[in-house]
Amino acid sequence: MRFKGLVAAAFTPMHNDGSIAPERVEKFVEYSVGKGFSGLFAIGSTGEFSALTMSERKTVAEAYVKSASGRIPVIINVASCCIGDAQELAAHSAALGADALCVIAPFYFRPGSVRALADFVKPVAQACDGRPLYLYHVPGMTGTNLPMDEFLKIMVEEVPNFAGLKYTAEDLCQFRRCIAVSDKLQILYGRDEMLLGALATGAEAGVGTTYNYLPRIYHGIYDACQRGDWTEARMFTDLGHRALKIAAGYPGSFNIFMKFAGIDPGPRRLPAPRYTPEQERCFRQELSDAGLDPFIG
């Protein structure tokens, strides 16, 4: 399987009391299908995987795979610092019929070499029942920033079902080196604000949170790049940067922005901040004042 275009980083909907709301996942899947996304990346950073219990993660995975029902591919993040938990989650998601799985470098006791990272990922790959497994490379969160092209050379030789990376980092030189390792792998790009640069560097697909609530902007970037219209691609990129600059003043406000797009994921779990109705109103007004109304939702 190779992804093309935009893969949306999916939310884990919550009730107001902070409990998960799997019954609302179907609404998010319908929205994603309607917006023309080429896949869903579930239970990742946007889906608050690190704030969920094992049981909750399994329930949300079940809801996404069942709701997608083959209409849109679903990648399930099975990351854990505990290799046994990652294997358990991988086996569970594979049995559900997830299209692909993803794991993250452990972020407490960190691997000190590409070989150590490969040795952590390989047993998880074996638990995937042959389904594709990606590594979510996000050094800004994990603190593990190893030469990923060297890691990929090990994985492509030793792990048949290893599929590539979700590459969420700013180093486009390394990103290009990763793409060049093997045609058997796919390197999905995960830094929303740098999608244009990644596409120019050879990305076939991006994975992003912002895609959810600004789909017109990110489809605009992708489609313009496919046509070779770099002026239009830069115009849409500038709009995305305008929105992201405003959102930066409201840290952890992904769910609020999604509510502005028409679907309320509910509150995020602690330690994410909570915003008052007045703060939400100010956030929405800033977006409107910036001329972004036509692009939300």
Image (cartoon, rainbow, N blue to C red):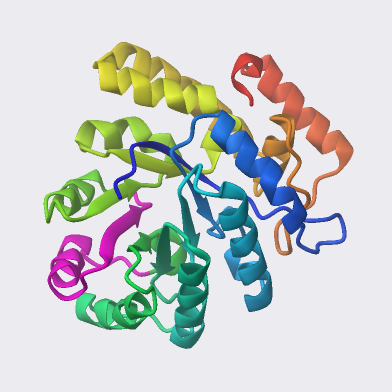
Q: Is residue 174 above or below residue 163?
A: above
Residue 288, picture quadrant: top right
Residue at horizontal 74%, vertical 49%? Answer: 24
170 sits to left or right of 33: left
251 sits to left or right of 191: right
Provide the residue span drawn in magenta.
144-170
Q: In the rendering, at what x and y percent does residue 89 appear? A: 51, 75
Using the image as rendered, state which of residue 5 and residue 18 is in the foreground.
5
Using the image as rendered, state which of residue 244 and residue 160 is in the foreground.
160
Residue at horizontal 48%, vertical 62%? Answer: 97
Q: Is residue 172 above or below residue 23?
A: above
| Residue 273 seen in this snapshot | no
Q: Is residue 190 above or below residue 93?
A: above
Residue 277, picture quadrant: top right
Residue at horizontal 33%, vertical 63%? Answer: 132
* Residue 149 magenta: yes
Q: In the rendering, at what x and y percent does residue 130 appear? A: 32, 70
